[in-house]
Amino acid sequence: MKILWVPVLMAAGLGCTSAPQPPATVKAETLAADNSVPASDTARAIQHIKEVYATINKEKLTQKSLKWETDTTCEAPPMSGTLTYFYRGNEIVKMLNAGGEDHGSWKEEYYFDNGQLVFVYQNNTYGGAANPDEFNYQSRYYFAGGQPVKNSERQYHAIER
């Protein structure tokens, strides 16, 4: 079984030595579109990614979940969540990392096509007990051939939903 350890290690690496931090997200600066990809190829790649996304979400897939929690003895609020792997046969086609802590929650979806990451969707909400103003952050990242081809990010008050 092939396991992708980045989200697992990210969750396990959270410790008691620092103030609470929002869940790690992919930074937009690291995902600037690759100028070597022609616009026509980008449009074709994004259309293919949308088809992969739709197919994966329509299929009946095998799921395996891993629940995780940070150390509850530290000063920082504990975080917990579930990492779910979605399989087509022995191939991972989707991962869902969802969780929260007392200041917010997150949902991150990772989509794969033939073993390659093609799409990341992040939906994070911060606010709650520490801040009555609740904010929502949404990001979408598209990849083709291992290279970023498009990203979009949006931030808004939860009231605007």
Image (cartoon, grey):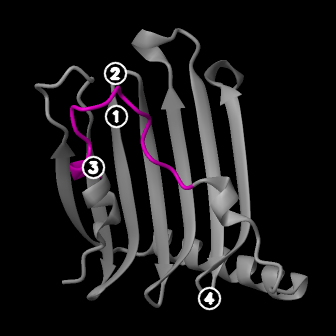
Q: What label sits on residue 127 in the rendered view?
A: none
Q: Residue furthest left?
A: 73
Q: CA distance from mark 1 to mark 2?
A: 7 Å
Q: Mark 4, residues whose alpha carbon is within 10 Å: few (<14), some, or many (≥20)? A: few
Mark 1 element type = strand
Residue under label 1: 100
What crowding class fits label 2: few (fewer than 14 Cα within 10 Å), some (14-19), or many (20 or more)? few
Q: Which residue is mark 4?
A: 145
- Sequence-first disc among 3 and 2: 3
| Residues shaded magenta | 11-26
Q: Residues within 10 Å of mark 1 (few under 14, many from 20)?
A: many
**Mark 4 → mark 2, Cα distance in angstroms:** 38 Å
Q: Is residue 152 above or below residue 159?
A: below
Mark 3, mark 2: which one is toward the viewer? Answer: 3
**Type of amino acid under label 2:** Asp
Q: CA distance from mark 3 to mark 2?
A: 16 Å
Give percent across and percent down for residue 149. 73, 74
Q: Amino acid at mark 1?
A: Gly
Question: Is there CB contact under 8 Å for labels 3 and 2?
Answer: no
Using the numbered discs, state the Cα–Cα distance from disc 4 to disc 1 in whole angstroms: 32 Å
Against 72, residue 113 (above or below) is below
The mark nearer the N terminus, 4 or 3, is: 3
Give the quadrant of the N terminus: bottom left
Identify the residue shown where x is 43% and y is 87%: 115
Q: Which residue is mark 3?
A: 11
Dot 3, crowdedness within 10 Å: few (<14), some or many (≥20)? Answer: many
The residue labelled by disc 2 is 102
